[in-house]
Image (cartoon, rainbow, N blue to C red):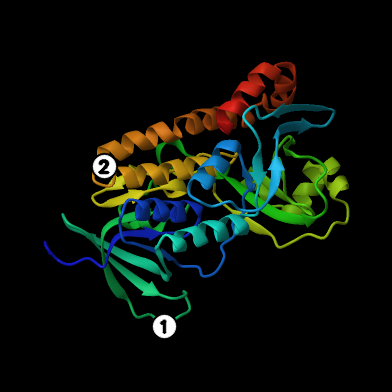
């Protein structure tokens, strides 16, 4: 198969923010790019929707500037206690995921990336490229597989990555000490109510966290994170039983559609396999607890394009880009899963210098 013509230099599988960022970076490097996603239109996702200052800078560096609400800091809250820290280096922004996607999609299109609708069903590699078997259109469309040849494939297709599985980089649930019964899930709804703060509020209960993010002048997003055994009760029950003060503040505000995501933890054996690179959540994810997903994913997208021809260099760059996220999030999730969970907010309130240092580390 050596010497065969390619259809594109880079096939990006997954048209979320990370995939669109990778496409934009690849076009800046002079490469032909096709972005493929099984979903059509503007994409949404169950997430906290807060861009910390570093994430906002990274989005702007790509040439996008989505609308939203200023975020000046983080507030950890529990009944009777709270700890606030305001960002030192300027604000972040609360941005609807649909608005972020639309801005990045427009930017990718502006720089010449092609976008297509379809799903990948098989990968076959040789020394010079990857043959990708795909089915155009939606899952319900008539199945007429096509084969596309790319020099490189970037798997940016999220927690349940098809590219990761087809490239043989999946880690089975339960392997290496993971416990599926402890897997955490996210649920998110928007409420039609004016924001009451310019901070991202993280409410802590004995069994769950609630992220409250202002995303428009009359809308707040509420994302709930909890283990499977707790999140199974459903959003409304979880909000009412775990966060009664927050539920009372929201009152009878009109609620939008419910979205869910999970299990949140996933791992990959490696980030590279031949000419395939895993980027963003597809490459491995610990938890949404620290809110760094977008910043870390965009840093990986940049690194993947810079090191397309050097798998070892990308692995090193991936570890560097994710080091703080993996260390801090793993530590905080371990604390939050222990009997000392109830001490998190009191400790943040008693040690504001330490709490502030952690927030600034995550926000940079």
Q: Residues within 10 Å of mark 1 (few under 14, many from 20)?
A: few
| Numbered circle sitting on residue 189 | none
Q: Position of residue 99 (x, y in %)?
A: 62, 58
Location of residue 119 in the rendering, given as x and y in whole percent from the top left corner: 40, 68
Residue beneath disc 1: 142
Q: Quadrant of residue 313?
A: top left
Which one is in front in this view, the residue at disc 1 or the one at disc 2? 2
Q: Nearer the viewer, residue 247 or 339?
A: 247
| Picture layout, residue 354 above or below residue 56 | above
Q: Earlier in the sequence, mark 1 or mark 2?
A: 1
Q: Find disc 2 in the rendering and name its residue.
A: 311
Visible residue check, residue 146: yes
Residue at the extreme bottom: 142
The image position of residue 212, as x and y in percent, is 73, 44
Quarter of the image for the N terminus: give it: bottom left
**Residue shown at the point (58%, 53%) measured from the top left:** 261
Q: Secondary structure at mark 2?
A: helix
- What kind of element bears circle 1? loop
Quarter of the image for residue 143 reads bottom left
User: Position of 185 compared to 320: left or right?
Assistant: right
Total marks placed: 2
Q: Nearer the viewer, residue 262 or 324?
A: 324
Q: Which part of the image, by quadrant, shows the C terminus?
A: top right
| Image position, residue 118 (x, y; %) | 42, 71
Residue under the point 75% across and 21% down: 349
Q: Are marks 1 and 2 in contact (CB under 8 Å)?
A: no
């Amino acid at each position: 198969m050596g010497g065969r013509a390619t259809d594109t230099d880079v096939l990006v599988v997954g048209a979320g923010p990370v995939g669109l960022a990778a496409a934009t970076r690849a076009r800046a490097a002079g490469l032909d790019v096709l972005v493929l996603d099984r979903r059509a239109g503007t994409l949404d996702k169950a997430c906290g929707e807060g861009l910390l200052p570093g994430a906002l800078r990274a989005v702007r560096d790509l040439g996008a500037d989505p609308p939203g609400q200023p975020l000046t800091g983080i507030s950890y809250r529990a009944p009777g206690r709270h700890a606030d820290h305001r960002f030192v280096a300027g604000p972040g922004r609360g941005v609807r995921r649909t608005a972020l996607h639309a801005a990045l999609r427009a930017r990718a299109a502006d720089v010449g990336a092609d976008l297509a609708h379809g799903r990948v069903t098989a990968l076959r590699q040789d020394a010079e490229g990857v043959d990708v078997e795909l089915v155009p259109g939606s899952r319900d469309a008539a199945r007429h597989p096509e084969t596309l040849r790319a020099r490189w494939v970037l798997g940016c297709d999220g927690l349940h990555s098809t590219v990761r599985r087809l490239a043989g980089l999946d880690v089975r649930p339960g392997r290496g000490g993971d416990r599926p019964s402890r897997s955490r899930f996210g649920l998110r709804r928007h409420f039609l109510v004016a924001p009451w703060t310019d901070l991202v509020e993280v409410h802590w209960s004995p069994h769950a966290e609630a992220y409250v993010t202002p995303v428009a002048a009359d809308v707040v997003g509420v994302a709930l994170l909890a283990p499977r055994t707790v999140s199974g009760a459903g959003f409304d029950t979880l909000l009412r039983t775990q966060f009664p003060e927050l539920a009372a503040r929201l009152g009878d505000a009109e609620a939008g559609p419910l979205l869910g995501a999970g299990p949140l933890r996933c791992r990959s054996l490696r980030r590279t396999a031949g000419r395939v690179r895993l980027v963003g959540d597809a490459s491995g994810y610990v938890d949404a607890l620290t809110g760094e997903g977008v910043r870390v994913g965009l840093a990986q997208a940049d690194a993947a394009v810079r090191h397309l021809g050097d798998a070892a260099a990308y692995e090193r760059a991936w570890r560097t880009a994710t080091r703080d996220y993996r260390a801090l999030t793993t530590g905080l999730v371990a604390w939050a899963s222990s009997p000392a969970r109830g001490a998190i907010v009191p400790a943040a309130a008693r040690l504001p210098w330490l709490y502030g240092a952690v927030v600034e580390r995550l926000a940079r």
